[in-house]
Image (cartoon, rainbow, N blue to C red):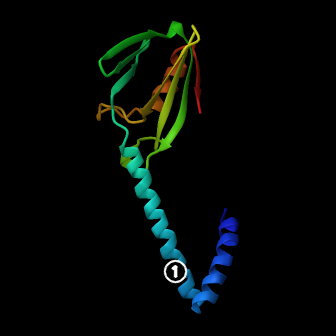
Amino acid sequence: MFAVIAMLSAPIIILIHQQFNVGIDETNLMLMILFWGLLFLLFRKFKNENNKYKTIGDIEFTRKRIIKRIGDTFSETSYNSIESIELQKHIPALTISGSKSGFYTYILSIKFKDSHKDSIIVSDRPLDKMQNLSITDTIKTLKRIITTKINII
């Protein structure tokens, strides 16, 4: 990775050095300012994107069923009617406070035996601030308890 960055930055350093007739130290300083500026702009853009997601419900995993509360809808699903559960990384959070384990939101897909599939975006932080379980910890524990096929991607 470092070699690729060095190969890409070498021609830029030479061009800046020749065009502006400045030393290598000033060229490196200019590139660092440019790099950190672009990094800051990307950070702000992605942070604003993550702030657009709002909590509209919650999902609870028990030993016998999954309980979903989304908006005004309440549903309980037995594990016997589920063929597989998949948890896939979705969008990384940009700050430590934005996530608990691994800095991601996840797509939770539940495939039922009757061939339909539910997919929802879940945060890895629990709603109850006193609990320390993330969605990945919950799914790993669920994997040991039930016989349904579970994939964590």
The residue indicated by pointer 1 is 30
Residue 26 located left or right of residue 7: left
Q: Residues within 10 Å of mark 1 (few under 14, many from 20)?
A: few
In which quadrant will I find the C terminus?
top right
The location of residue 114, given as percent across then percent down, is: 57, 7
Q: Residue at x 36, y 42 (%)?
A: 52
The location of residue 81, given as percent across then percent down, is: 52, 7
Q: Residue 49 versus residue 149: which sits nearer the camera?
A: 49
Q: Is residue 35 above or below residue 101?
A: below
Q: In this view, does 132 lie above or below 118?
A: below
Q: Residue 130 versus residue 80: which sits nearer the camera?
A: 80
Q: Residue at x 66, y 83 (%)?
A: 14
Quick check: can you spot residue 31?
Answer: yes
Q: Which residue is drawn at 45% across and 69% down?
A: 37
Image label count: 1
The location of residue 108, given as percent across then percent down, is: 50, 27
The location of residue 66, given as percent across then percent down, is: 42, 15
Q: In this view, does 37 lie above or below 147?
A: below
Q: Residue 15 versus residue 151: which sits nearer the camera?
A: 15
Q: Is residue 138 above or below residue 123?
A: above
In this view, the residue farthest toward the front is 19
Label 1 element class = helix
Quick check: can you spot residue 64?
Answer: no
Q: What residue type is labelled 1?
A: Met
In which quadrant will I find the N terminus?
bottom right
